[in-house]
Amino acid sequence: MLRTSLLAFPFLAAVHCGQENEGTPGGTTSTTTPPPTTTGTGGAGGGTGGAGGGECTTTDQAIRLGKLVDPEDGSVTDNAIVVVHEDRIAYVGTDATQIPCGATIVDWSAYTGLPGLIDAHVHFSYQTDEEPGTLPWERSRYLADNEPYTLMELARAAATATLKTGVTSAFDKGGYEFLSVALRAELASGETLGPRFFGANGGVYNFEYPGSLPLALLKSWVQQHKLRGSDLIKVWADQCSDQTLECSPTFTFDELKLVVDTAHDEGLPIAIHAYHGDTAKLAIMAAPDSIEHPEGIDAVDCGTMIDNGTIYIPTIDHNRYYSDNLDFFGYPPEKEAEFAEYIQENLASAAMAHQLGVQIAMGSDAVFTGFGQNTRELTWLVQAGMTPLEALRAATINGAQSMGLHDKIGRVAVGYYADIIAVEGDPLTDINVVINNVREVMVGGRVADF
């Protein structure tokens, strides 16, 4: 199990106010307490900041970056300084006098800074211990029913693998509720090393009750999720077979609209899973905050998404993952061609949506051994016609918007959570820099020590 020793705050034993005293990372501290207090003798400002005349005491940190990219407009700040107070950003700019006297200096000046990435669609609790003779989906259910602590350990490892990719916020859109609640608490406290967690704690579906449902019952399901502490509502609008890759609708438009309206009345964002165009059309008309997976959407659907502010999360790469792991899932070889066909249809839908102006967010739909590959979705978004900047925006600002968190995560700006990553290379010319060259990760003011 990953414990507090895995999170580290770089600190200085003694930090003075002059420029010559910039420090280097090192050391650890408990994640349930603020970063270690640093002290330094006075100075007269103009160095690393602060008014002089005595010892300086602060828990603030200052990150020095070679460059800082703002995904909102693509602007680049050279020799950027980001001051972090507790878990929030207090200053962004180039003025060294804004660094509080005695602040911890985090030297990432060799790298380019980006906002922490957002994976808008994961399933941390879909895990297997790969017991010989078992298949992952069935084994996941078995572990949930019989060995929940084993399942929890696997989910913890998935969270850490996700953070290593530079994903500092993850939206868990369906799984085992007991695990989601516990994992969210561990990640928030720092007991487990991973991204900030927002979860649906399961979801709303109609697999067991063929035909229409009483609207009062549907409304109560949403309200129950609110009372159980869900951060969002997830709805499965169709039921799909992983064997045949076919899906069938399970809700009417009126039912979907009621669920969406109830979620919004309860103050929760709502995401609707809909794989194919016929189901997606109903889901899009219901005006959710995000629509997950669909291919086969048309220009009318795109216009409706734009009008309603619905974010499209295509999750193209997850079918590449299934195709690359046929034996693991017990699929016959001919399934590879089916996955390839679906990928192309999904890619075409994403390309059309992007061209028409639909906001798209990065979602990996990571399951099982797919954690650690979360950001490979960015390659497909670029293939769909996005520039590297637009793909970066999909992995930050648009993801935040899909959950109504656009004023808290997705940018390096004053008042936002101190979720920052450092990459080697130019992310505005090569998206692979974001995928392969993450060198440092800070989440909520904590520098991850992997």
Image (cartoon, helix red, strand yellow):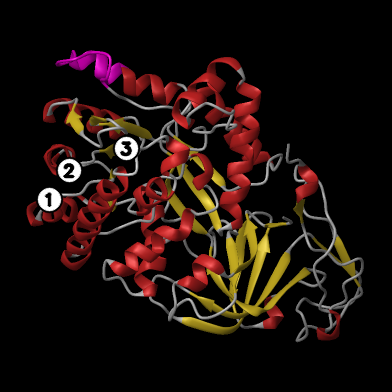
Magenta extent: 206-220
Q: Please tell me whether residue 39 is drawn above or below residue 200 in the rendered image.
A: below
Q: Residues within 10 Å of mark 2 (few under 14, many from 20)?
A: many
Q: Amino acid at mark 2?
A: Ile
Q: Please tell me whether residue 229 is drawn above or below residue 379 in the rendered image.
A: above
Residue 362 image offset from top left, x and y in percent: 38, 56
Work out whether residue 90 can be spotted.
yes
Q: Is residue 218 magenta?
A: yes
Q: Of the residues under marks 2 and 1, which one precedes in the sequence?
A: 2
- Camera-nearest residue between 334 and 156: 334
* Residue on which disc 1 sits: 301
Provide the secondary structure element on which disc 2 rests. helix
Q: Please tell me whether residue 31 is drawn above or below residue 399 in the rendered image.
A: above
Provide the secondary structure element on which disc 3 rests. strand
The alpha-carbon separation of the residues under discs 2 and 1 comes to 7 Å
Residue contact at pointers 2 and 1, CB within 8 angstroms: yes
- Camera-nearest residue between 228 and 234: 234
* Residue on which disc 2 sits: 284
**Horizontal side, residue 115 vs residue 21: left or right:** left
Q: Of the residues under marks 3 and 2, which one precedes in the sequence?
A: 3
The alpha-carbon separation of the residues under discs 3 and 2 comes to 12 Å
Residue 347 image offset from top left, x and y in percent: 25, 59
